[in-house]
Image (tube, rainbow, N blue to C red):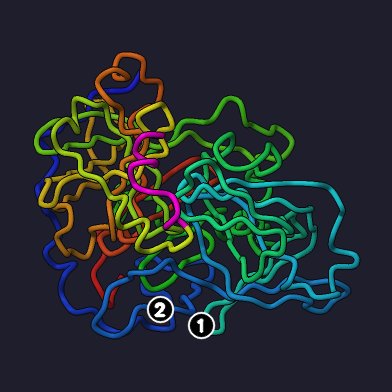
Amino acid sequence: MRNALTMAALPAVLLSAIAAPAMAAPGGNPLPDPGGVFLSYVNQPTVGGVIEKSPELAVKIWAGGAPVVGTHAVMDTGSVGIVISRDAFGSNDAGIDTGEPGSITYSSSGKTMSGTTGHAPITVEGANGRSVTTEAIDFLIVDKVSCAKNARHCQATSHPTGIAMMGIGFGRQDKNGDETFTPARNPFTHVASQNDGTVRRGYVVTAEGVQVGVNPMQLTGRDFELTTLQPDPAHQDQDHPENDDWLPQDVAIMVNGQSTQGQVLIDTGVTDMYMTVPYAVSQGLTVSACEDRTKEHPAYDTQSCATIEAAAAKGDYTSWTTLQPDTDVRIGISNGQVPVGLSAAYGFQVAVTAAVAPDRLLLVRNLTPSDADTAIEPTFVNTSVRFLNGFNYLFDQQDGYTGFRLHVPGKS
């Protein structure tokens, strides 16, 4: 049973320092008590800017002692596992492709990527020249992309190209793909050099780069507000604890003073925020975002907004709705303690430019009054990558910790 979060602790807009001009990120590790290996993003924010796009790192896949694939991949805390389209391999997939079928679904976009499983060591490198290399792990070689009904960002194809995602999240089993997308596929918790015990399995994500491996000193509570996660009882591996999974973290959401509680996903793989709240919380505050959809995706022009909205009204809750401009949104992430406190909290106004504000806020399964009493979708918020303009984000896989620390541009 969840504890009640203290909604009074949620600020209207925090972190005025976040909007200050950023300095160029250093090549070295800017975090307190640095440890592990710090990889700066290959698409770092420009000087004077904030992170606006999902971060990318260079990825190499090895076979026979030599790299056979080299590409840039999105670093995604909202999924688990590396996903690369077959075109990146050319004719170099012999000895890598196991032939075992697999698929993964990205709920934010509505894309399902399917293909076969690859197995190989993988090197991940930053713009600063530092790198880590995994043990041989499974990943997906994509041969086909299909789209869920009324998908938000999807173009079906049987010849996909240019796909490269690197999922490093937790708590995503039963939410993305088939049952094979487990923590066993997380590259940052299967780094060969972490086996010597000097650093812990996990990472710290910042706006400038990611520290792979957690220094035990970073778990003292001195610099990071820590939360102890609860083990996912359905996904524990006694023989391989590095593959244990953890339940998502609790969150409090306030919309124009109306509050609710649910779960949070810190997701660097998207720039939009996705939110599910009870009808009573969003009542009278919703507007259609369908015109944005058709404007940005010409393939949808033949499907009118009226058709899309009618489908949503009939129970297809993959809606394209948002909150009215200037709606006040506040988010507080629980520290899991009693009495309850918050490990991170921030706020913004919808459609008002701010460093921590997402590109857009999209309501998922926003229920109508007739559906309100039978709703089964829990309250949920996906923060978007813009969260990194407010906080550094730590994940310790070994004992199930998350940690948050205020981000200072240019200093992390």
Q: Pointer 2: residues within 10 angstroms few (<14), some, or many (20+)? A: many
Q: Amino acid at mark 2?
A: Gln
Residue 60, by quadrant, is bottom right
- Marks 2 and 1, the one that precedes in the sequence: 2
Tell whether position 97 is magenta: no
Residue range of the region highlighted in magenta in the rendering: 300-311
**Above or below, comparing residue 253 to residue 159 in the picture:** above
Location of residue 121 in the rendering, given as x and y in whole percent from the top left corner? 76, 65
Q: In the rendered picture of this protein, how many numbered marks are placed on residues? A: 2
**Please, what secondary structure does the residue beneath circle 1 have?**
loop
CB under 8 Å between discs 2 and 1: yes
Q: Which mark is residue 127?
A: 1
Position of residue 357 relative to residue 254, above or below, is below
User: Most extreme residue toward the top, as rendered?
Assistant: 373
Camera-nearest residue between 36 and 49: 49
- Check disc 2 and report the residue beneath it: 44
Image x and y of residue 171, in percent: 51, 39
Q: Magenta stretch: dominant SS?
A: helix
Q: Amino acid at mark 1?
A: Ala
Q: Quadrant of the N terminus?
A: top left
- At x 40%, y 56%, the residue is 218
58 or 132, nearer to the observer: 58
State left or right for residue 386 relative to residue 303: left
The quarter holding residue 160 reads: bottom right
